[in-house]
Amino acid sequence: MSKKAILEVDGKRYEFPVLIGTENEIAIDIKALRGVTNGITTLDPGFKNTSSCESAITFLDGEKGILRYRGYSIEELADKSDFLEVAYLLIFGELPTEEQKLKFHRDIQKTSLVDEDIKKILDGFPKSAHPMGVLSALTSALTAFNPKSVNVESEEDMYRAICKILGKFPVLVAWAYRKEEGLPLAYGDNSLGYVENFIKMMFELPNEEYKMNPVVVDALDKLLILHADHEQNCSTSTVRVVGSSHAGLFASISAGISALWGPLHGGANQAVIEMLEAIKEDGGDYQKYIAKAKDKNDPFRLMGFGHRVYKNFDPRANIIKVAAEEVLADLGIDDPVLDIARGLAKEALSDEYFKSRNLYPNVDFYSGIIYRALGIPVPMFTAMFALGRLPGWIAQWKEMRLRKEPISRPRQLYIGETLRPFKSFEER
Ligand code: ACO
């Protein structure tokens, strides 16, 4: 028998269907609420209790620390798959056959050149510009160079648009980095894998051959896989919201990049390293910073700790912690910042304040350490996250459009002034 939820307001009872997901998650379907109650809404700032859509892409259970893409565990994908394959899985729903994967890669490569005029736009930015601002602007600019909107009814059109953004975006990320470093812009090498090619585009110098380090490729591949999707987080919701107005794929992704930029979301990886550096500069006394984080009169928060949905542990953090140790060992890096990170994590994990609030190190606590070891400058960290999240944004945008979701338009509870007469200057 199907379940029902009963709502009683002012003595009137309303019945709503209860939906059950494939992992037995329960949601009260309130689509009819305003209609049947004559205007009542629900209030849920930050959407802490709101499922904004039905989705078949990513499952996560914050209490149990589970993350799965299309049913495959993140642990298995990080161990056995690669980023391109995971991108295909997220976007098209199944792991590709060998042939499908080769074709996908070839089709992405075919679209990877960006219009030379994009370089003029890039030229207009000062070197000091934050790469996330540059990336958001350049991704939006791609719309101007590809003005024909995607016909979402056509599988071929969709496929072409998806390949285009997957081909051009890594070029833009690499160029944002090279601009900041004052390096000539490069296009990489199509004989390489997707991630290898990206690494070459980033780090290749004009006067010497680039030597690929498999440990670096593997660590970056893992990092990108771990960041590839995370259901309805802030930037993904932004992509879906913007796309729901039928704005194009590039414009929607550009908005997602802006949402990811903030320190409470993707910007946390940058904030973590800046915090660890500041602790080091301040003498390395991390206990002092634990105390600051606990002090309610101090706005300081321990960056890289806590998560809106993971309340036991972040499974991505467990994988990335091991990868970070491996990379540092392989590259022979003895980083004092890592010792501070280890100390902070150990201390916080046994502290009552953090334990009682379920605050654990999240993926960003460790990802910045790897990026730093790879020689990626701090402001580029969030851009690396964006590269990883791209397949998730695409998959969620595609799902939203194919399910013909309505335009996102929340309601509000108005708490402002009621009607009042206009005041002249003399009366104000
Ligand atoms: N340091 C110290 N205290 C914290 C922290 C932290 N990092 N995070 C949460 N708290 C405390 C809050 O002060 C609050 O305490 P109270 O109940 O005494 O008032 C309690 O824990 C709950 O915090 P909320 O902000 O309500 O939790 P929410 O789920 O809204 O926020 C968030 C989650 C934004 C991630 C938060 O934990 C935070 O700011 N963390 C630091 C930034 C960060 O690492 N962000 C990356 C997230 S992962 C990602 O985007 C990939």
Image (tube, helix red, strand yellow):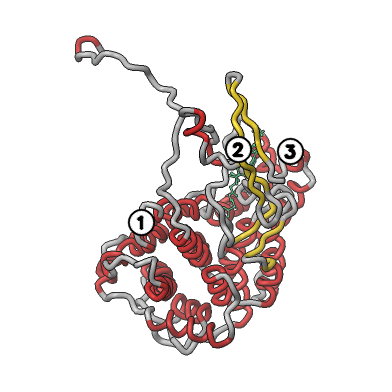
Q: Nearer the viewer, mark 2 or mark 3?
A: 2
Estimate the spatial distance between the alpha carbons at disc 3 and disc 1, rounded to whole Å. 45 Å
Q: Which residue does the image show at 37% across and 18% down from the upper left? A: 417
Q: Is residue 400 above or below residue 349?
A: below
Q: Is residue 36 left or right of residue 13?
A: left
Between tags 3 and 1, which lies in front? 1
Q: Of helix, strand and loop, which one carries label 2?
A: strand
User: What number is the disc on residue 353?
Assistant: 3
Within the displayed image, which quadrant is ligand 1 positioned in? top right
Residue type at mark 1 is: His
- The residue at label 3 has a CB less than 8 Å from ligand 1: yes
Q: Relative to residue 66, is residue 63 depicted above or below? A: above
Q: Are marks 2 and 3 in contact (CB under 8 Å)?
A: no
**Residue tagged 1:** 246
Q: Position of residue 151 (x, y in %)?
A: 35, 67
**Residue type indicated by callout 3:** Tyr
Residue 269, image x and y in percent? 56, 56
Q: Does 377 appear above or below 332?
A: above
Q: Residue furthest top?
A: 427
Q: Which label's residue is closer to the chain start, 2 or 3?
A: 2
Q: Nearer the viewer, residue 148 or 166?
A: 148
Residue 355 in view, yes or no: yes
Q: In which image quadrant can residue 340 be found?
A: bottom right
Q: Name the residue carrying label 2.
A: 16
Measured as percent of width and height from the top left, residue 50 is found at 57, 42
Name the residue rendered at 65%, 53% in the picture: 21
Q: Residue furthest front?
A: 1
Q: Are marks 3 and 1 in contact (CB under 8 Å)?
A: no
The kind of residue tagged 2 is: Phe
Q: Earlier along the polypeptide chain: callout 2 or callout 1?
A: 2
What's the residue at 42%, 73% (across, down)? 155
